[in-house]
Image (cartoon, grey):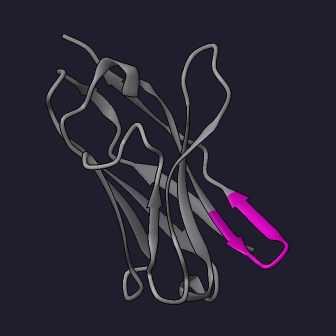
Amino acid sequence: QVQLVESGGGLVQPGGSLRLSCAFSGIAFSDHAMSWYRRAPGKERELVAAITDADGSTKYADSVKGRFTINRDNLRDTVYLQMNSLKPEDTAVYYCNAVLRWQTYWGQGTQVTVSS
């Protein structure tokens, strides 16, 4: 059974930075594609960034390109989301997601609030 635990959220001023972490427990972390999603108040959940299991290719939502970076550490079974130049519209609960074939797992989420 896979468990995902996010951390690193909090309150930050516009223009600031945060790094989210997602600790994976279970087997074969390196075989899982990993992603970060977010859900803002009153909005649907959206994909923020994703990284493959194979070659580490990444993709990003247009709204975060150039500001956010996803990376994974297969030795520490952890995926990160570095968020720079944060904007108030980045305020949301951020969720970690792991996928292996037909199996999908979610973390409990971590709140990110961007406000002055």
Q: Residue furthest right?
A: 102
Residue 16 x, y percent position in the rendering: 14, 32
Given residues 25 and 18, the one toward you in this image is 18
- Residue name at image x 27 percent, y 24 percent: 87
Q: Quadrant of the N terminus?
A: bottom right
Q: Residue furthest front?
A: 62
Q: Is the magenta region chiefly helix, strand or loop? A: strand
Q: Is residue 109 left or right of residue 63?
A: right
- Residue name at image x 47 percent, y 62 percent: 59
Residue 107 x, y percent position in the rendering: 61, 52
Whether residue 102 is in magenta: the answer is yes
Q: Quadrant of the C terminus?
A: top left
> As displayed, is residue 70 above or below residue 93?
below
Whether residue 32 is in magenta: the answer is no
Q: How many marks?
A: 0
- Residue name at image x 47 percent, y 46 percent: 61
- State which region is magenta: 98-105
Quadrant of the rendered image containing residue 105: bottom right
> As displayed, is residue 76 above or below residue 8?
below
